[in-house]
Structure formats: structure tokens, C-alpha cells
Image: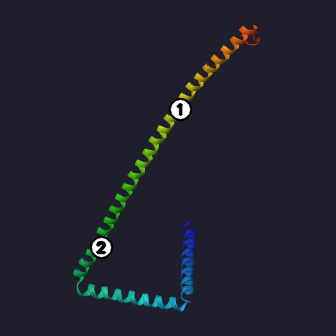
């Protein structure tokens, strides 16, 4: 884009913003309550600026010192607020970290218990299988002894 085009688009933007602001102000001022509030606020602002201007004329150094004190006080208040927020953040973060650690430990315990239960279950399953084999083997033996029959598939006595 050339400088001339940038200048035209910049001036169009400023014009559009100005027209929009004026249209918005006109729309707001249609209401009589809003007009009276704006008039009152403007009067208060004018009086406040006039008072500050007269204070500066009467005692420039004192007014400067007062302003500096106010700024310093506001800075201190903001620092305290930031410190409070930081400590609150740290506390919440620590509590959250502790809770996450607890959940992680509990999860590991549950997984470990589940693995142990699975191993125990396998052990029980193998014992049951052994018992079954014992029972079926002894039943098959006694049946084979009684009638001498043999299972053709397993070659075990039936």
C-alpha cells in the first residue's frame, strides 16, 4: 500500500469513528434523564478541574506533593492487592497440587490392588482347575475300574 492510500484509509477510519461517536452521543442524549445526568456529571467535572487548577495556582509545590502522595498511596494499595492475589494463587495452587498428588497416589493404590486381586484370582482359578482335574480324574478312574471303558479322545479312563 502506498503512503497516499494509507493516509486516505486512516482519515476514513478517523472520520468513521468520529461520526459513530457523534451518532452514539446523539442517541444517548435523546432521553431526558440521560441528558440531566450528563449535564450534572459535566458540571461536577468542570468544578473539580477548576478546583485543581486554582489549587495548583495557589500552591504548585504543595499540590504536586499531594498528588504524589495520592499516587504513592494508590500504588501501595495496588501492591498489597497484588500480594494478596499472589498469596491466594499460591495457596490455591498448593492445595490443588496436593489434591492432584493424593488422587495420583490413590489411583496407583487402586491399580496395585487390582493387579494383586487379578493375581489372586488367577491363583484361585488354577486351584479350582486342579480341584476339578482331581475330581474328574478320580471319577473317571473309578468309572474305568468299574466298567473298563476308556475315553477315545483323551485315552483316559471314563
Q: Is mark 2 on a helix, strand or loop?
A: helix
Q: Which of 26 and 13 is in front in this view?
A: 26
Q: Nearer the viewer, residue 101 or 83?
A: 101
Q: Are marks 2 and 1 in contact (CB under 8 Å)?
A: no
Residue 155 visible within the image: no
Q: Nearer the viewer, residue 4 or 42?
A: 42
Q: Is mark 1 on a helix, strand or loop?
A: helix
At which x and y percent is residue 88? 37, 59
62 lies left or right of 157? left
142 lies left or right of 40? right
At which x and y percent is residue 141? 69, 11
Which residue matches tag 1?
A: 117
Which residue matches tag 2?
A: 71
Please report the residue visible at 31 percent of the width from the left and 69 percent of the height from the top.
77
145 lies left or right of 11? right
Residue 62 visible within the image: yes
Looking at the rendering, in which quadrant would you find the N terminus?
Answer: bottom right
Q: In which quarter of the image is residue 20?
A: bottom right
Please report the residue visible at 27 percent of the width from the left and 86 percent of the height from the top.
55
| Mark whose residue sits in front, 2 or 1 | 1
Above/below status of 126 relative to 70: above
At which x and y percent is residue 37? 47, 89
Q: Looking at this view, name the residue that lies furthest to the front.
A: 146
Q: Upstream in the sequence, badge 2 or badge 1?
A: 2
Amino acid at each position: 500500500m502506498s503512503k497516499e492510500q494509507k493516509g486516505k484509509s486512516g482519515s476514513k477510519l478517523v472520520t468513521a469513528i468520529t461520526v459513530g461517536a457523534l451518532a452514539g452521543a446523539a442517541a444517548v442524549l435523546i432521553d431526558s434523564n440521560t441528558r440531566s445526568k450528563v449535564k450534572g456529571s459535566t458540571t461536577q467535572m468542570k468544578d473539580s478541574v477548576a478546583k485543581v487548577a486554582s489549587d495548583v495556582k495557589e500552591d504548585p509545590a504543595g499540590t504536586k506533593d499531594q498528588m504524589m502522595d495520592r499516587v504513592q498511596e494508590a500504588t501501595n494499595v495496588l501492591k498489597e492487592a497484588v500480594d494478596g492475589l499472589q498469596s491466594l494463587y499460591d495457596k490455591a495452587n498448593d492445595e490443588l497440587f496436593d489434591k492432584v498428588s493424593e488422587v495420583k497416589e490413590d489411583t496407583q493404590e487402586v491399580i496395585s490392588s487390582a493387579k494383586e486381586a487379578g493375581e489372586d484370582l488367577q491363583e484361585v482359578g488354577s486351584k479350582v482347575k486342579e480341584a476339578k482335574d482331581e475330581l474328574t480324574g478320580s471319577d473317571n478312574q473309578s468309572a474305568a475300574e468299574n466298567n473298563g471303558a476308556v475315553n477315545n479322545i483323551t485315552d483316559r479312563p471314563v
